[in-house]
Amino acid sequence: MADCTDPAIDAAYLDVRSDTSETNWLLLDYENDRSDKLVLTSTGTGGLSELRDSLDDGKASFAYARVSYSNDKESVRQKFILVVWIGPHCKVMRKAKISVHAADVKQALRVYSIEVAAREKDDIEQESIVVRLRKAGGASYDGV
């Protein structure tokens, strides 16, 4: 069981979800290698590219992000994603616990359109995420 009770996690979650905030992502990491307690590591306003740069190849982390995209020049959509990051150099025991801990994280970061299982930083590319969001959104009038 992962401990997601740090009040900073909920505050950052609400900040990312807020229409009045520029913050568009948050990152949760484990307190240390032996701990199952998650702490807020960072937040940012630079979108998925900035989030990708914040990921550590030796860690397992959880991220929550607001993704903006438009279907046409008249509309902009805001959707949220949950990223489950397992870096290529993450320790085996940490990898083994991620699937169980993800359930606890999903209770803390409740509302999202898609879950992204990322093993490489390229798994968090804006274009591929937007394609998945469009498919998850139902009606698509642009052939995606």
Image (tube, grey):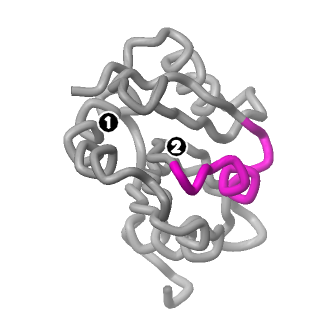
Q: Is residue 122 above or below residue 3?
A: below
What element does badge 2 sit on?
A: strand
Q: Residue at x 63, y 75 (%)?
A: 127
Side of 117 where 67 appears, left or right:
right
For the residues marked 2 and 1, what is the alpha-carbon distance in whole angstroms? 11 Å
Categorize mark 2 by other alpha carbons within 10 Å: few (<14), some (14-19), many (20+).
many
Q: Residue at x 58, y 32 (%)?
A: 17
Q: Amino acid at mark 2?
A: Ala
Residue 57: x %, y % from top left: 57, 56
Residue 54 belongs to the span the image colors magenta: yes
**Residue in front for this viewpoint, 77 or 112:** 112
Q: Which residues are magenta?
A: 44-58
Q: Is residue 113 above or below residue 141?
A: above
Q: Residue at x 60, y 73 (%)?
A: 122
**Residue in front for this viewpoint, 50 or 114:** 50
Examine the image and state in which quarter residue 37 appears.
top left
* Image quadrant occupied by the N terminus: top left
Examine the image and state in which quarter residue 75 appears.
bottom right
Q: How many marks?
A: 2
Residue bearing mark 1: 106
Task: Specify which label sits upstream in the sequence, 2 or 1.
Answer: 2
| Residue farthest toward the bottom in the current orientation of the protein | 143
Residue 106 belongs to the span the image colors magenta: no
Q: Residue at x 38, y 13 (%)?
A: 5
Residue 90: x %, y % from top left: 44, 53
| Residue farthest toward the top in the current orientation of the protein | 7
Residue bearing mark 2: 63
